[in-house]
Image: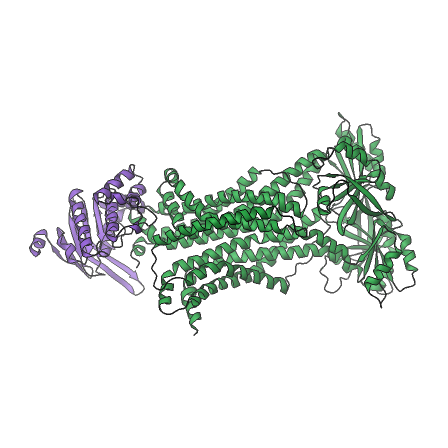
Chain colours: A green, B purple
Amino acid sequence: MNAGWLLFLRLIVRPMAREPIRMTLTILAIALGVGVMIAIDLAGQAAAGSFHSSLESLTGNNDLTIRATGGVNEELLGRLAQLPYAFDFAPRVEDFASINGRGEALPFIGIDVIGHAMRAGAFEGGSAGINPVWAGPNPIWVGARLELHKGDRIRLLINDAIQTYTVAGVLRPPKNDLGENNAIIADIGLAQRTTRKIGKLDAIDVRVPAGRSVDYWQKFLEKQLPPSATIDLQGSRTEENRKMLAAFRWNLHVLSYIALIVGAFLIYNTISISVVRRRAEIGVIRALGATRSLVANAFFAESLVFALIGSALGLGLGRLMAIGAVRLIGNTVESLYVSSNPAQIQLTLNTAIAGMAIGIAVSLLAALAPSVEASRVAPVEAMARGREEYVSRKRSRGLLIWSLVFLIAAAILSLLPPVGRQPIFAYGSVILLIAGTSLLIPNAVTLFAGAASDAVRWLLGVEALLALRSLRASLNRTSVLTAALATAVAMTASVGIMVGSFRETVRLWMDNQLKADLYLRPAGSSGADRHPTMSVDIADRIEQLPGVAAVDRFRAYPISYDRLPATLAGGETLKQEANARTRFLPGENRDVIFSKMGEGDYAIVSEPFANKHQVRPGSVLHIPLAGSVHEFKVVGIYYDYSTERGYVIVDRRTLLKYLPDRSISNLAVYLKPGTDRSIMRRQIDDIIGRRAVMVSSNSTLRRGAIAIFDRTFRITYALEAVAVIVAVMGIAGALLAMAIDRRREFALLRFLGGAQPQVRGIILCEAGLLGLLANAIGLILGTLLSLILIFVINKQSFGWTIQFHWPVALLLIALSGIYLATVLAGLYPARMATCMNPIEVIHEA
Amino acid sequence: MPLLEVRSVSKIYQTDGGPVTALRDISFGVDAGDMIALVGRSGCGKSTLLNLCGTMDFPTAGDVLLEGQNTKELNDAALTRLRREKVGFIFQSFQLMHTLTAVENVELPLLLARKSNARATAMERLRWVELDRYADRPPHQLSRGQQQRVSIARALAHNPRLILADEPIGNLDTATGEVVLNLLVRAAREFNVAVIIATHSAESATLADRVMHLRDGRMEQVSSEIEIARAR
């Protein structure tokens, strides 16, 4: 048998088998790290993949899509159809519907059913000859996931109206379709009537004639279109959405690596323990002729075993965790970005290979230093433990210098601008800050152990003193564990502070922005890109009620600006000025801005829009509307936290000038002081009548917004929790190793009159002190990281200004939970230590 | 009443290869101030007997009474209390805690027993073994002889009635071993503490008041002070 293999089996595998629990914990740490990474990747793909499938798979293989803000005039289709080329044009109307006005928003797509059936043959039982089941009223075809059958009658809420429709057939999903299959298709005429888009189309899909490139035809058609219309390659909207989601997904990816980074600390620790324990054996085999590389490879192989098993388990775990993650991510995407329904989760070979590769690479990298250290053990070396400590302490002084270098570099990187709208340098700064702090930890432990010695002994007795001394004595191990837990704590604290600050900022923003007493919007679920409308007569009649001081009619249209999704909206700016307290960026005069708005083509933009498109007051926006491109001068940038898409707001009169559809997306109602709200509410309900319009009080709206906000960040908390679990598992494993390594010490204590509870107390104290130190360092590091997250990463990725705020209660709960978990992690090792037979142990060789 | 009374004690260990008898029908008594050498080859049962005397283990048959208290009748907590008040241990490999300084090692039994004034008592004992100037040194900065002297100071720290020394000079050279043995003799006299030394060294035995010879778990011979003096 090969010598290296034999060495590996005898030096590494045999001792591993003797400690199954510790080995399992290490493997689980890797599995969780890889699993989270895979889960976020799969869930992100699924969430981003769903809008792709809902539109594109249903509309077949087209080359180009024509769109215009507020819709394309139907006559354009007639004109294009007369072109003397074999184009194939497919008109489309898009909206959202919900069954019985409840549940998820389903894509409601109006197409030329006959034409489409002839082209795609996608309908059940229908090929060229469409089955005239449409004998029923309002025929629709539904996706298979809705579990409806031909002939079923359902009530759909579209905008503010509920109507009954008949299922004329079930859509046959295209081959290999990953879509959610939940769309509802209607003939275009019906869709136009239902969505109040008579004479309008949301898009025209184009299949170009053969013989020339798509690019050629795109340029050709561009010339035929009015300036307000755009023609893009099919899928460009999906690409825009993907681009918009890139920062969000990128940030999630980075968060998902934390558990693996924490896992890497633990791999380092595990291999270090292996090396320390086998120093004598290493010395002997080196004396017997083993080369340095043979020794290093044996320890590398140990980490490879952990990595292979852990990463393989991580793949399965990731696939399972993705189910939960996709729901959480889907919620966020839906709330902040774009309508989306989770698509199927698919663990592809590429994702699996990438996950395995990262898991193995991180594990091997983490094992590098201890493996090299093992190879440097001198033959027949019998290093006294005291000497080891001395070497550790000396080394820690050298680390101090490196630590300072890293921290200064981190500070510099945090000041650099983004690269391609990605906060690359800021992430570099985060990594350097974590690395710099980790290198500082040996000195922090020494300082803490020295300074706290007397206090700890006085407060907690001899058990705590022994625990503290042990922490200082095994500086290498303690530092790595503290660094792992501190990193997990820091990430939890930083994300907690960031989310808490964001939440408080949003709450304050709502205090200023939401001043109306009642808010009305079409019933059914809303989304960042869904702006269902309701009839304006509701607003007109409410305005006439005696108790109403003012109403603010608001209309929003999804647009594409600079190849990124955004929202164009019109509001009654004078009423906003009088009633709401919209806050603008420092240095901007609110009164001047609002007075300007009513004068013509002026716009205010939200902060995320301004940051995304580098817009400043005085900038001119070019927005294609009503047949031509119009210029809007930006007069102000306001704080907005409702969507990351970004808003361009013009006065309602300006908007109506170009898009004369008076329907409104929502309505704010300001009541006169002293008005009886219940009477007013009844009167408003009478005006609404049978229309599906939702009325929310100010407080309900705020509660709803905060609920959405909290839902949005659940995924980040879940990721932090996994990192903390990995770190606590590491602590448990290390304490177990410590209990085994220090068994003679514990046995001696029993000889010297130490009781079993005292031995248990030492291990629990050690866990407690480790937890305390890690929590303290983690909180400081977390606060620094939160500053980078809030003022650099968030600003560069999403463009939001967040006011710093300490979420004291949240931090207290989170850190206490982590602390408790750390102490509990010591229970099993403590039990093991008390169960040892002191006589056997003390007489061991 | 003798300080320590060992009555017809036997100890049998159950092993994979069947039961192994470590001690057979051992009886003896120890009074305060006695200096006893337990002599025999490795594996004859010396350490087992010390562990039984030190309340670290129970006999399979017979009784061990320390100041009249039968160890068989006490639970773990009571045995721990008895040990921390009445017994001091000295080991061949010193067994000092490397994370503590010399004085901290000495005060450890006092701290475990929650005794007040631990530091002052520990310093006093270190002074007694003439190592007070090394009080703040960690063990690895002391010689082997010094380490064993610290270990003697630790064994005496809580004023025990009985000191059990398991091969106390086994890891020391002859001259240093002599110093250590003399310290133990002095301890017996000055503190009126009974000392039992397990050893296979004839030299250690010559300093004892009584020598008990163990062979294969049996007490073969007990030499009195007069016989030892004659042998000298």
Name the residue nearer the viewer: A175 or B100: B100
Residue A78 in view here: yes
| Front position in the image: B172 or B117 | B172
Image point 31% across, 53% down: which residue?
A: A838
| Residue A302 in the image: above or below residue A443 | below
Residue B163 percent across, percent down from the top left: 21, 48
**Residue A611 percent coordinates (x, y):** 71, 45
Quadrant in the rendering for residue A110: bottom right
Q: Give the residue at the far top of this rendering.
A: A674
On screen, residue A822 versus residue A65, left or right, reads: left
Q: Is residue B29 above or below residue B114?
A: below
Return the residue nearer the eye: A709 or B126: B126
Judge whether residue B6 can be spotted in this image: no
The mark total stands at 0
| Residue appearing at x 49%, y 42% in the figure | A776
Which quadrant does the N terminus of chain A fall into?
A: bottom left
Name the residue located 40 percent from the left edge and 48 percent from the top edge: A471
Q: Where is residue B80 in the image (x, y as percent from the top left)?
A: 29, 45
Q: Where is residue A235 in the image (x, y as percent from the top left)?
A: 76, 58
Which image quarter is the C terminus of chain A in? bottom left
